[in-house]
Image: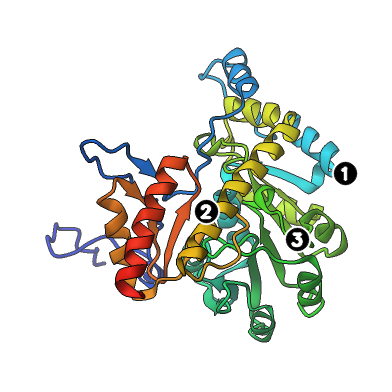
Amino acid sequence: MSTPDTSADSTSTPRLRASLETFPPYVPGKAPKEIDGLTPFKLSSNENYLEPLPAVVAAMVADAKNPALYPDDAALALRTELADRLGVSLDELIVTTGASELLVALTQITSDASTEAIYPWPSFEMYPQTTGLAGSKRVEVPVRDDGRHDLDAMAAAITDKTSLIILCSPNNPTGPALRDEEVRRFLDHVPATVLVALDEAYWEFATADGVVDGVALVADYPNVVLVRTFSKAHALAGLRVGYALAHASVIQGLFKAVIPFGVTDVSQTAALESLRHSDEVGIRAKEIAAVRDDFAEALRNQGWDVPEAQGNFVWLPLGPLSSAFEDACVEQAVAVRNLGDGVRISIGEKEGLDRVLTVASAFYAEHFG
């Protein structure tokens, strides 16, 4: 009986899944360049430039527990508070290590090499990563010229192999928010067997009329799962806390796919305290939204075609000039996010935004004036 040849071969590498070659890795936003005389600004990761509320920091310090012990895997206190506020039952909620883990888990419970996943593009960069890793065929439906989802095209893309559809509102990176009426029309054309994930990572910043109501959608459509996070408006990105609202059968599936004990006790405590100060969080989110609107309007006054901005960022659809614009910002110690089709600028401190406006004015005059 022959045995496999296990001798070392410098030309061979471990066998990895072929699907890894079909999508890029997630690349975080770059740090700003250090330049003498200029304060650096990182406007590349959609982080909240405001610090967490003082009560949240105090709660974290007061409630620090023995790190030798596992955290509450069920995140019972946080889920109970969320359930009370959203008017749902505990078995309709799950808490995870950020919304990112939810996207991975949703793909794991719906997708494999025999399925198809539909999502808008450009949108959040993890969508091709998570669906591609599952081996699912990725159907990227281009957003419209105004940066909005093309829901008619997404509905037309559904086949009998479709297992997962992802919607993003407000859409990262282009900015527009979905409206409730258009999403309901879309869902009426989606088979009940297809899971639809509504990614609302930036919902607190949205100020437009008629924005989609994810909580109500879950109540009305059993195949909808709402994905939210404490990373953005709550300013807790470093603590990694997200949650999903869905019908109990979907939540049961997600519990099988997420990492046990993923959300630390400190993270749960911070999220719970921040949730109890939701009114203050909401006020701060709307203050950031006001800065965003002023920034977007200033860009439009320069001549830029800026799509509706409803998150804590603004999108410039620069196409092949994206890298040149990024480089111009880099030389002013400002990091922005070059995504190939355009540049996303996170809302931050006034000095940083003013510096981007100066760069943008000169860039527009050079290339479009």
Q: Between disc 1 and disc 2, whose residue precedes?
A: 1
Callout 2 amino acid? Phe
Q: Is residue 88 above or below residue 279?
A: below
Secondary structure type for disc 1: loop
Who is closer to the viewer here, 21 or 245? 245
Q: Is residue 353 left or right of residue 202?
A: left
The answer to which of marks 3 and 1 sits earlier in the sequence is 1
Where is residue 199 drawn, in percent x and y? Answer: 64, 58
Extreme left residue here? 10
Q: Quadrant of the C terminus?
A: bottom left
- Asked if 148 appears above or below 152 in the picture, the reply is above
> 39 or 170, which is in the foreground?
39
Q: CA distance from mark 1 to mark 2?
A: 36 Å
Residue placed most toward the observer, 296 or 27: 296
The residue depicted at 57 percent of the width and 76 percent of the height is: 143
Q: Is residue 241 visible?
A: yes
State the image coordinates of residue 320 (x, y, percent, origin top left).
Answer: 33, 75
Looking at the picture, how far across and down is residue 228, in whole percent? 66, 49
**Amino acid residing under circle 1:** Gly
Report the colour scheme.
Answer: rainbow
Q: Residue at x 77, y 60 (%)?
A: 209
- Label 2 neighbour load within 10 Å: few <14, some 14-19, many 20+: many
Q: Which residue is mark 2?
A: 295
Kindly identify which residue carries mark 1. 87
The answer, for residue 242, to whether it is visible in the render is no
